[in-house]
Image (cartoon, rainbow, N blue to C red):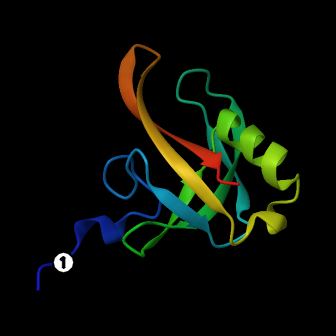
Amino acid sequence: MCPDASELDQYAAADVDVSDGDLVLIVGAGTVSEFEDRTTKEVRRRLVIPIKCVEGQVKDLSLNTTSRKAIIVAYGKSSEGWVDKQLAISVVTKDMFGQLKRVIYATPVK
Protein backbone atom coordinates (compact mmCIF):
# COMPACT_ATOMS: atom_id res chain seq x y z
CA MET A 1 0.00 0.00 0.00
CA CYS A 2 1.38 3.41 -0.96
CA PRO A 3 1.55 6.09 1.75
CA ASP A 4 -0.70 9.15 1.48
CA ALA A 5 1.77 12.06 1.39
CA SER A 6 -0.95 14.56 2.42
CA GLU A 7 -1.15 12.87 5.85
CA LEU A 8 2.04 14.72 6.76
CA ASP A 9 0.33 18.13 6.54
CA GLN A 10 -1.53 19.52 9.57
CA TYR A 11 -3.49 22.17 7.66
CA ALA A 12 -6.16 21.55 5.02
CA ALA A 13 -4.78 22.35 1.58
CA ALA A 14 -6.89 23.61 -1.32
CA ASP A 15 -7.35 21.01 -4.06
CA VAL A 16 -5.57 18.37 -1.94
CA ASP A 17 -7.63 17.89 1.24
CA VAL A 18 -10.63 20.06 0.31
CA SER A 19 -12.10 20.97 -3.07
CA ASP A 20 -14.69 23.38 -4.34
CA GLY A 21 -18.15 22.11 -3.36
CA ASP A 22 -17.02 19.80 -0.54
CA LEU A 23 -19.06 19.57 2.65
CA VAL A 24 -16.89 19.24 5.77
CA LEU A 25 -17.72 18.80 9.46
CA ILE A 26 -16.34 20.94 12.28
CA VAL A 27 -15.00 18.48 14.88
CA GLY A 28 -13.60 20.82 17.56
CA ALA A 29 -13.76 24.38 18.91
CA GLY A 30 -10.28 25.18 17.63
CA THR A 31 -7.63 27.58 18.87
CA VAL A 32 -6.41 31.09 18.15
CA SER A 33 -3.10 30.99 16.33
CA GLU A 34 -0.63 33.84 15.89
CA PHE A 35 1.49 34.24 12.77
CA GLU A 36 3.69 36.87 11.20
CA ASP A 37 2.32 38.54 8.07
CA ARG A 38 4.89 37.91 5.32
CA THR A 39 4.44 41.37 3.83
CA THR A 40 4.00 43.70 6.80
CA LYS A 41 5.84 41.55 9.39
CA GLU A 42 3.10 42.37 11.92
CA VAL A 43 1.75 39.62 14.16
CA ARG A 44 -1.77 38.59 13.20
CA ARG A 45 -4.26 36.20 14.79
CA ARG A 46 -6.51 33.61 13.18
CA LEU A 47 -8.97 31.06 14.45
CA VAL A 48 -7.91 27.55 13.44
CA ILE A 49 -10.59 24.85 13.62
CA PRO A 50 -10.32 21.10 13.08
CA ILE A 51 -12.49 19.78 10.25
CA LYS A 52 -13.30 16.30 8.99
CA CYS A 53 -12.67 16.27 5.26
CA VAL A 54 -14.66 14.31 2.67
CA GLU A 55 -12.19 11.41 2.71
CA GLY A 56 -12.39 11.18 6.52
CA GLN A 57 -9.07 12.75 7.51
CA VAL A 58 -9.07 15.48 10.17
CA LYS A 59 -7.17 18.64 9.21
CA ASP A 60 -6.87 22.13 10.67
CA LEU A 61 -8.53 24.95 8.73
CA SER A 62 -7.22 28.47 9.29
CA LEU A 63 -10.28 30.68 8.86
CA ASN A 64 -9.95 33.88 6.88
CA THR A 65 -11.99 36.87 8.06
CA THR A 66 -14.76 36.36 5.50
CA SER A 67 -15.31 32.73 6.52
CA ARG A 68 -15.08 33.44 10.25
CA LYS A 69 -17.67 36.24 10.10
CA ALA A 70 -20.10 34.13 8.04
CA ILE A 71 -19.81 31.28 10.55
CA ILE A 72 -20.38 33.64 13.49
CA VAL A 73 -23.57 34.98 11.89
CA ALA A 74 -24.91 31.45 11.32
CA TYR A 75 -23.67 29.55 14.36
CA GLY A 76 -22.89 32.19 17.01
CA LYS A 77 -19.75 33.76 18.49
CA SER A 78 -18.58 30.78 20.56
CA SER A 79 -16.74 28.26 18.42
CA GLU A 80 -17.72 25.55 20.91
CA GLY A 81 -21.22 25.85 19.46
CA TRP A 82 -19.87 25.16 15.96
CA VAL A 83 -18.85 21.58 16.73
CA ASP A 84 -20.73 19.02 14.59
CA LYS A 85 -21.90 21.72 12.18
CA GLN A 86 -21.27 21.52 8.44
CA LEU A 87 -19.38 23.92 6.20
CA ALA A 88 -19.53 24.18 2.42
CA ILE A 89 -16.10 24.73 0.91
CA SER A 90 -15.33 27.09 -1.96
CA VAL A 91 -11.85 27.22 -3.44
CA VAL A 92 -11.04 30.27 -5.54
CA THR A 93 -7.94 31.71 -7.16
CA LYS A 94 -7.06 35.15 -5.78
CA ASP A 95 -4.28 37.64 -6.36
CA MET A 96 -2.51 37.84 -3.01
CA PHE A 97 0.19 40.51 -3.07
CA GLY A 98 1.06 39.86 -6.71
CA GLN A 99 0.89 36.06 -6.52
CA LEU A 100 -2.04 33.88 -7.55
CA LYS A 101 -3.08 31.64 -4.64
CA ARG A 102 -5.81 29.05 -4.17
CA VAL A 103 -7.88 30.31 -1.22
CA ILE A 104 -10.34 28.27 0.87
CA TYR A 105 -13.63 29.87 1.92
CA ALA A 106 -15.96 28.09 4.34
CA THR A 107 -19.69 28.86 4.37
CA PRO A 108 -22.12 27.54 6.99
CA VAL A 109 -24.69 24.97 5.87
CA LYS A 110 -28.09 25.53 7.46
Depth check: give the residue in front, 44 or 102: 102
Residue bearing the label numbered 1: 3
- Tell me the quarter of the picture where residue 84 sits: bottom right
Residue 21 x, y percent position in the rendering = 43, 48
* Amino acid residing under circle 1: Pro
Task: Name, please, the residue furthest toward the left.
Answer: 1
Q: Residues within 10 Å of mark 1 (few under 14, many from 20)?
A: few
Is 98 on the left-hand or right-hand side of 109? Answer: left
Is the N terminus in the top left, top right, bottom left or bottom right quadrant?
bottom left
Residue at the image position 37 percent from the left and 49 percent from the top: 19
Query: 23 above or below 93?
Result: below
Q: How many marks?
A: 1
Residue 42 x, y percent position in the rendering = 68, 29
Depth check: give the residue in front, 52 or 44: 52
Residue at the image position 66 percent from the left and 40 percent from the top: 67
SS assignment at label 1: loop
Is 12 on the left-hand or right-hand side of 62? Answer: left
Residue 60 x, y percent position in the rendering = 54, 62
Is 100 on the left-hand or right-hand side of 37? Answer: left
Task: Name, please, the residue furthest toward the top.
Answer: 98
Task: Name, please, the residue furthest toward the front.
Answer: 110
Residue at the image position 83 percent from the left and 66 percent from the top: 81
Residue at the image position 35 percent from the left and 22 percent from the top: 100
Residue 62 x, y percent position in the rendering = 59, 50
Is 41 on the left-hand or right-hand side of 78? Answer: left
Is the C terminus in the top left, top right, bottom left or bottom right quadrant?
bottom right
